[in-house]
Amino acid sequence: MSYREFVQWQAFNSISPIGDERTADTGPALIRQHMTNLVSKKGAQSIPLADYLPFRQAPPQPENDLDAALIAWARSHGAS
């Protein structure tokens, strides 16, 4: 590894570290997803893996009818 590659890696690692923080979550989430799929009825929709990860952001909950309408509109136009 050249010095330039090492400095680039240091810069990248300072912005987005590569570590076990997310890796430790993925294994148990995969097991929970698989077990849920085994127990659920055939033909039932599979639950996405992201639903089992602990750091997933919850979708916004509408506080009133206007918020509910805006969230429904955003989802119908491709926003999640």
Image (spheres, rainbow, N blue to C red):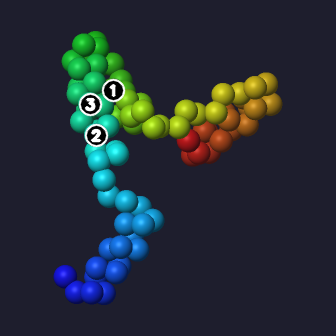
State which quadrant residue 64 falls in: top right
Q: Residues within 10 Å of mark 1 (few under 14, many from 20)?
A: few
**Which residue, given by chain and number where applicable, does mark 1 sit on?**
46
State which quadrant residue 74 falls in: top right
Which residue sits at x=33%, y=26%?
A: 46
Which residue sits at x=23%, y=28%?
A: 31
Q: Position of residue 79 (x, y in %)?
A: 59, 45
Q: Position of residue 19 (x, y in %)?
A: 31, 53
Q: Amino acid at mark 2?
A: Ala
Say which mark, if any, is on residue 28: 3
- Tell me: residue 68, above or below residue 2: above
Which residue sits at x=28%, y=82%?
A: 5
Q: CA distance from mark 1 to mark 2?
A: 22 Å
**Which residue, given by chain and number where applicable, does mark 2 sit on?**
24
Q: Amino acid at mark 3?
A: Pro
Q: Which mark lies nearer to you, 3 or 1?
A: 3
Q: Nearer the viewer, residue 47 or 69?
A: 47
